[in-house]
Amino acid sequence: MPSADGRPWPPGPVPGRDDFAAALFAPDLPVPAGVVGPGGRPAGKRFAVYRNNVVVSLAESLKATYPAVAALLGDEYFSALARLFMSAHPPKSPILSRYGGDLSDFVAGFAPLAAYPYLADVARFEWAWLESYHAADAVPLDPAELAVVAPEVLGDVRFRAHPAARLLASGFPVFDLVVANRFEPEVSVPIDLLESQTVLFSRPDIDVMFRVLPAGTAALAKALLAGQALGEAAELAFVADPDFDFPQGLSVLLSAGVFCGLDRGTA
Amino acid sequence: MTLTTDLRIAAALPARAGVGLKGEHVPDILGSRPDVGFFEVHAENYMEAGGAPHRHLEAIRRDYPLSLHGVGLSIGGAGPLDRDHLARLRKVADRYEPGLFSEHLAWSTHDITYYNDLLPVPYTEATLALVSAHIDEVQEVMGRQMLLENPSTYVAFAESTLSETDFLREIVRRTGCGLLLDVNNVHVSATNHGWSAETYLAEFPLEQVREIHLGGHAPDIDDDGLPLLIDAHDRAVDQEVWRLFALVANRLGPLPTLIEWDNDVPAWPVLLDEARSADRILTAAASREPRRALG
């Protein structure tokens, strides 16, 4: 088997490695041939240590990424779900903070959880939080930079999205659900499962900030983060909310630090 | 960046106890600047672009030397090394200038799946060729010596033809790598396979050891009721491991020695106490005339 880049490989075969690897995620497969305990004795429980290490450590990694999903499901259910998920979607990278981004889609398609349709968005929230947490550092745009743009070309301004900015539009009260199940709120608020919430994530320094945006500001954020000009974005915001307070909405985004630069357009 | 680098303490690790860095201890460490020899980090925890982990490690690196410990290279993997991962590892090393860099005699990736565990290799001529080729490549890309850590294992392979110590000695001869001696792993593997830990240490190429690891293990039994120790890093260092460590320290003199406690992580003062215990043994060893042969 030559390697993808043409390096000669392998220097020697590793017999049995396929069987060893396959058995790690498959408790019904036998202990691989030639894997033994002291004096050549069978190694059933010994091999199970490796199976256990793999499964438990990956489940814990997923639980660390998705504490609110785990709290909503309970530890036992979450661990069982994690096992099914890791068999279907094993990690492809040794960087564990990148593992499990597709858990939300897995949950959305998992029939036994169909009665809890908000769970997938809770997972999306926690993944967005993690992406924001680990994103590249950047200094947020100083609002004073916008103040010196001539009014007649303000509508042409485009912003550069800060690497840590994320926007999550949910048909569920995803902010309330995550706060109640992850962040130990001092005051618990009643959760209305019919509410929709769009959440903005930003990280002006090293702490991830998140807030619910009203419809107009959400539309403005979506358009600006997608690179649309300020004039176009404002129009979309007024479509979403005819009473939209534009200066207030833009101020929210600027003070959250969701941009890290601006282009003044072609005018 | 140059300014930051210039303000850093030198890279070389002192022959003292260090501690594996856990995120929950960062406030204690930055708040109290404890007197520990060095910190060690898992390289894979610093491969994201930015954010708090890097900010904290930058701050810690200014005041402490650092040891970089890889857990994901899969040196014993059957296929080629992941070159992207190796490049990321180099980037972490360039950024943080560790005094030592180590990896494991184990595999964790097969085909494209990463298993997140340090899985065992058979000790054969074929594995020697494989592991040596991988270490050559790692040292070439990293531009520095790698330390290879002896594994903790729960099973053996019927096909193995070499002892673990002969295997390690030959790897060192072929690649010029150094060794990281994990004394807990010696005790765990010796117990699990019915070896004598002291005989293992007498046969170990101790002259190539550049760093020592100490950690806790969990006791269990196998199907036949034989003791089975799990390398869990979830508790204090065992008395027997302290005893073996003192043997090694008295033999080699003081070396950088890491306390690993990765699960059920205790409050910072508990971990600091473990480091103090290791320092006492290292200090006692420093006052002796090092002997160059065990037993």
Image: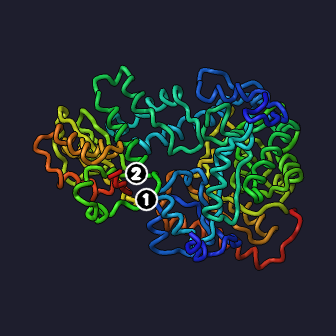
Residue A156 visible in this rendered orientation of the protein: yes
The quadrant in which residue B145 appears is bottom right
The residue lying toward the viewer, choosing from A127 and B270, is A127
User: Residue shown at 34%/55% (left/top)?
Assistant: A264
- Between the residue at mark 1 and the residue at mark 2, the CA separation in whole angstroms equals 8 Å
In the rendering, at what x and y percent does residue B234 appear?
A: 55, 52
Under mark 2, the amino acid is Ala
The quadrant in which residue A48 appears is top right
**In this picture, residue B272 sits left or right of residue B238:** left
Q: Indicate which disc, 1 or 2, sits on the residue closer to the N terminus.
A: 1
The residue lying toward the viewer, choosing from B280 and B175, is B175
Q: Is residue A253 above or below residue B56?
A: above
Helix, strand or loop status at disc 1: loop
**In this picture, residue B115 sits left or right of residue B124:** left
The residue lying toward the viewer, choosing from A142 and B225, is A142
The residue lying toward the viewer, choosing from B21 and B2, is B2
In the rendered image, the quadrant that contains the C terminus of chain B is bottom right
Residue B234 visible in this rendered orientation of the protein: no
**In this picture, residue B40 sits left or right of residue B31:** right
- Residue A138 numbered tag: 1
Dot 2 crowding, Cα within 10 Å, few <14, some 14–19, many 20+? many
In the rendered image, the quadrant that contains the N terminus of chain B is bottom right
Under mark 1, the amino acid is Ala
Helix, strand or loop status at disc 2: loop
Return the residue at label 2. Answer: A164
